[in-house]
């Protein structure tokens, strides 16, 4: 072991310059992070500039790291007959151990040690530090692993770069070919399911990763131990062949249980409450000149009736199956789009009313009636034209062209297998609207960068910098429910009045940067006033507020967010006896 | 006992046969030179001996071990210096020695100091900054300090100027004279090798031409000049090479000269004028054998 460390020390001394650059990329990034977290003012445009710089910094780090692997191996080359070490008392296994140890130091220990102060500064606990460390190591495995394999089989940096470019080109070409020819059905059949980490496709992909890692390890070990390049290349070809076979042929069919595990039973049977029905005829888009794929897509809507009060419902999976009387059967996975924002009722239910003085809406008869009915309705809900207890989801699904063309004239039956997450919205800790250095929260923190009342537009402009642990967002290892908080908007809450205000536009400006497992987001928020009042008095014209000024209202307000955590799952099969799809105006029906 | 033995050692690169059925034996304690022209297969042979290349067929045994199985235990007792070896040029001479030292249990720091002084190497200069001659000396130094049983040198004088070459040869002679080790040196620089070797192996086109002690080799080769009384066809005997006749003068190389029998044979063959035989340098022997071999190859091709 002493001699192994002796080789490692030699390598580290040799690579001290690129290693310093490697470490510097981390330090510079953390300096940027610190600067962002502690800046007193930050323009949105400057933030975007920093984002671009961070992208460049990450590219430099990636390139440095990738070249470091090669340099590490080439210092004791495994290819050719001119290397220094093979005629010295250094065994292949000792050299392999030394190189792996050096990799562990360079690509795991050093980044973790450099990142540790940053993580601690951002309030990471022991568990988060552990998870972030594992995540950091996992993010290095692919480039370092590929680099090790290529460097072990090549003798010079020129060849290393050439092989890398060839590999990238081969992967890109394969993916392009699969997409172009629809061969995804052959390779990684049903790849979209992977997103849900469900069923056999995920298992298949994990097996593929493990086989690739094991195969790469065998090739590297073989080359280190024997230095027989031809045999190592043959071994590599064998590994590649096994990976292709595994990708093309998979004998196991695991049952998808991802929607069964850990699903808490709702208080009442959901089937009795929720109904999912198609709203109207679907539209069929037929590409006039189908160059790639079928070019035939079905668009439609599903209506979710009586969603569970207090819970959001979010579609995660939809499988469409059409059956014709002649026995023809087609199945395809579709995409469901459905977003739900917290209603004011949900939000305000979480705000204790210190001051009972009612708002204009609450003084009205409709609100009093809704109280009598046991479900207080906010103004915005009451003025909606649609039923506030229903949701509308859009769907689109690609179907084979022949069947798509047949749909309008020969109507099939259709079964849609819909799976959803039920999300529990919860108000997070509030942040006083006061600019300063204080951070609210621990590892999940916010700070008001600036707060300014715009008298001309009569809006409150707030700039919020947010940080939260984003462990595994690059390489997803841990289910990290706090991610969902990213999508949640900031609300202004006035506890004294028991009212809340949404940002002017829920799709307000925000921009994020990821620095060492910490996501830093700049929110550019604009508020007019409490929602009921604003909606009741729509006086915003051309960006200029002509209604009353709520500057005083905001002086008592704080910011809050609604976080969503998965409270359960729900699945339903929607049966449509006669599926109707009408060609849209752009379609050209032959 | 032989420290190096090869049996039908063969190495092919595609269709090209670099070494063909080589049977070689290097006695322990000798200083053996492997001579041959450029491309004769010397480096390939040596690379097989130190397990940098695997033989296509045949076998090489070094210190009693199959060369393919040579490992750290054998390399602790072996030194290898090659003109093509990639030394860690970013190191200083001192760093090179510091790096190599822990790998050798028998590393002798006293010898290291002696050799540093002998070879006059600048310790704090980076290898990339020193001359080629110095680089070879540094490589030699890093291969001598642990008193190897076997030192293999592959073209160590190649590309060196005469002065440096002389210094290096002197160093090797000085070191090898005072130690009990075997030196196996490949070169096409015959004059330099002649001064230090006691065993010669000659290789041509991958095939071994001869392998024997230098003394015996030089004893059995003679350049013979003879006068013929008439312009009749000259006589010929087995072992005579490069027979040339110009008028009544004849010259040849006797590769089977015997100090007792050969003069008698010359008297018998050249009774009137006689023949004068003179010893040959290794260079002359080498050139004679190389030309003979080339002629034979041309003849076979024709």
Image (cartoon, rainbow, N blue to C red):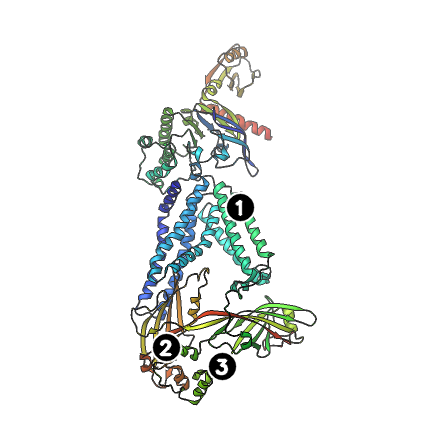
Q: Judge whether B107 appears above or below A312 on screen.
A: above
Q: Secondary structure at mark 2?
A: strand
Q: Which mark is residue A492?
A: 2
As drawn, is A473 to the left or to the right of B236?
A: left
Q: Which numbered disc, 2 or 3, marks the residue that appears first in the sequence?
A: 3
Q: Which numbered disc, 1 or 2, marks the residue that appears first in the sequence?
A: 1
User: Could you tell me residue B122's position as x and y percent?
Assistant: 31, 36
Whether tag 2 and tag 3 are in contact, CB under 8 A, the answer is no
Quadrant location of the N terminus of chain A? top left
Q: Residue furthest right?
A: A326
Q: Judge whether B280 appears above or below A80 on screen.
A: above
- Report how far apart the C-alphas of labels 1 and 3 lie in the structure: 64 Å
| Picture residue at 33% right of the left edge, 58% below the top | A117
In-front residue for pair A187/A484: A484
Crowd rating for badge 2 (residues with CA inside 10 Å; few <14, some 14–19, many 20+): many
Q: Secondary structure at mark 3?
A: loop
Q: Judge whether A12 appears above or below B273 on screen.
A: below
Can the viewer see residue A532 in this picture?
yes
Residue where numbered disc 3 is placed: A388
In-front residue for pair B82/A392: A392
Crowd rating for badge 3 (residues with CA inside 10 Å; few <14, some 14–19, many 20+): some
Q: Residue furthest front?
A: A267
Q: Secondary structure at mark 1?
A: helix
Residue where numbered disc 1 is placed: A233
Q: Judge whether A483 appears above or below A237 on screen.
A: below
**Same chain shared by disc 1 and disc 2:** yes
Give the chain of mark 2: A
Give the chain of mark 3: A
Give the chain of mark 1: A
User: Could you tell me residue B198's position as x and y percent?
Assistant: 43, 23
Circle 1 or circle 2, nearest the eye: 2
């Amino acid at each position: 072991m002493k001699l192994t460390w002796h080789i490692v020390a030699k390598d580290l001394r040799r690579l001290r310059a690129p290693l310093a650059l490697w470490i510097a990329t981390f330090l510079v990034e953390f300096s940027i992070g610190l600067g962002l977290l502690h800046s007193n003012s930050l323009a949105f445009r400057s933030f975007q500039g920093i984002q671009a710089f961070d992208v460049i910094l990450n590219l430099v780090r990636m390139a440095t790291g990738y070249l470091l692997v090669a340099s590490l191996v080439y210092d004791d080359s495994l290819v050719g007959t001119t290397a220094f070490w093979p005629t010295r008392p250094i065994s292949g296994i000792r050299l392999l151990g030394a190189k792996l140890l050096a990799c562990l130091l360079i690509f795991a220990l050093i980044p973790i040690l450099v990142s540790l102060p940053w993580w601690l500064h951002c309030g990471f606990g022991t568990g988060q530090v552990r998870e972030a460390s594992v995540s950091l190591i996992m993010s290095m495995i692919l480039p370092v692993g590929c680099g090790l394999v290529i460097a072990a089989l090549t003798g010079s940096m020129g060849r290393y770069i050439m092989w890398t470019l060839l590999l990238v080109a081969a992967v890109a070409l394969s993916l392009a070919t699969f997409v172009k020819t629809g061969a995804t059905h052959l390779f990684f059949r049903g790849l979209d399911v992977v997103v849900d980490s469900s069923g056999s496709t995920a298992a298949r992909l994990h097996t593929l990763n493990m086989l690739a890692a094991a195969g790469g390890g065998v090739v590297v070990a073989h080359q280190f131990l024997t230095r027989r390049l031809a045999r190592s290349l043959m071994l590599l070809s064998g590994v590649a062949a096994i990976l292709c076979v595994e990708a093309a042929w998979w004998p196991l069919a695991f049952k998808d249980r991802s929607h069964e595990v850990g699903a808490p039973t709702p208080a009442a049977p959901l089937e009795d409450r929720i109904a999912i029905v198609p709203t109207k005829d679907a539209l069929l888009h037929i590409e006039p000149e189908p160059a790639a794929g079928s070019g035939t897509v079905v668009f439609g809507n599903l209506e979710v009736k009586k969603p569970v009060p207090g819970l959001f419902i979010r579609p995660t999976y939809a499988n469409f199956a059409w059956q014709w009387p002649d026995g023809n059967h087609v199945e395809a996975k579709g995409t469901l789009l459905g977003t739900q924002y917290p209603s004011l009722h949900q939000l305000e239910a979480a705000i204790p009313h210190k001051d009972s003085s009612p708002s204009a809406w609450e003084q009205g008869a409709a609100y009093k009636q809704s109280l009598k009915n046991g479900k207080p309705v906010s103004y915005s809900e009451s003025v909606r034209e649609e039923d506030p207890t229903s949701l509308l989801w859009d769907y689109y699904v690609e179907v084979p062209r022949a069947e798509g063309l047949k749909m309008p004239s020969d109507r099939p039956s259709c079964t849609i297998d819909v799976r959803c997450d039920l999300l529990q919205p919860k108000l997070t800790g509030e942040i006083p609207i006061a600019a300063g250095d204080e951070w609210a929260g621990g590892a999940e923190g916010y700070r008001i960068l600036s707060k300014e009342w715009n008298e001309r537009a009569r809006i409150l402009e707030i700039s919020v910098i947010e940080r939260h642990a984003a462990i595994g967002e690059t390489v997803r290892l841990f289910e990290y429910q706090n991610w969902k908080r990213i999508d949640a908007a900031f609300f202004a809450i006035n506890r004294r009045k028991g009212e809340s205000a949404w940002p002017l536009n829920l799709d307000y400006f925000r921009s994020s940067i990821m620095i060492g497992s910490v996501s830093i987001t700049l929110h550019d928020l604009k508020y007019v006033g409490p929602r009921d009042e604003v909606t009741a008095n729509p006086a915003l014209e051309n960006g200029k507020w002509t209604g009353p000024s709520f500057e005083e209202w905001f002086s008592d307000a704080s910011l809050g967010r609604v976080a969503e955590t998965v409270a359960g799952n729900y699945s339903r099969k929607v049966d449509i006896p006669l599926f109707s799809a009408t060609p849209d105006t752009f379609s050209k029906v032959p | 006992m032989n420290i190096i033995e090869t049996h039908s050692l063969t190495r092919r690169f595609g269709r090209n046969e670099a070494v063909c059925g080589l049977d070689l034996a290097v006695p322990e304690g000798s200083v053996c030179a492997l001579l041959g022209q450029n491309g004769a297969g010397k480096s390939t042979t040596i690379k097989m001996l130190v397990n940098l290349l695997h033989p296509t067929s045949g076998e090489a045994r070094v210190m009693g071990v199959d060369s393919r199985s040579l490992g750290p235990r054998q390399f602790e007792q072996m030194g290898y210096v090659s003109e093509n070896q990639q030394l860690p040029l970013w190191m200083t001479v001192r760093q090179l020695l510091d790096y190599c030292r822990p790998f050798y249990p028998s590393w002798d720091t006293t010898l290291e100091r002696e050799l540093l002084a002998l070879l006059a190497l600048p310790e704090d200069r980076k290898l990339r900054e020193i001359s080629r001659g110095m680089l070879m000396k540094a490589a030699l130094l890093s291969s001598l300090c642990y008193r190897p049983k076997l030192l293999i040198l592959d073209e160590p004088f190649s590309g060196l100027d005469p002065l440096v070459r002389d210094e290096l040869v002197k160093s090797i002679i000085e070191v090898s004279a005072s130690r009990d080790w075997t030196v196996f040196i490949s070169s096409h620089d015959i004059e330099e090798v002649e001064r230090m070797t006691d065993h010669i192996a000659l290789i041509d086109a991958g095939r071994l031409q001869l392998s024997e002690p230098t003394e015996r080799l030089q004893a059995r080769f003679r350049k013979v000049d003879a006068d013929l009384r008439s312009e009749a066809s000259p006589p010929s005997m087995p072992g005579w090479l490069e027979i040339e006749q110009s008028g009544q003068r004849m010259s040849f190389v006797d590769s089977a000269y015997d100090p007792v029998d050969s003069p008698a044979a010359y008297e018998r063959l050249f009774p009137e004028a006689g023949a004068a035989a003179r010893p040959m340098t290794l260079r002359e022997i080498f050139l004679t054998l190389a030309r003979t071999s080339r002629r034979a190859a041309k003849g076979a091709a024709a």
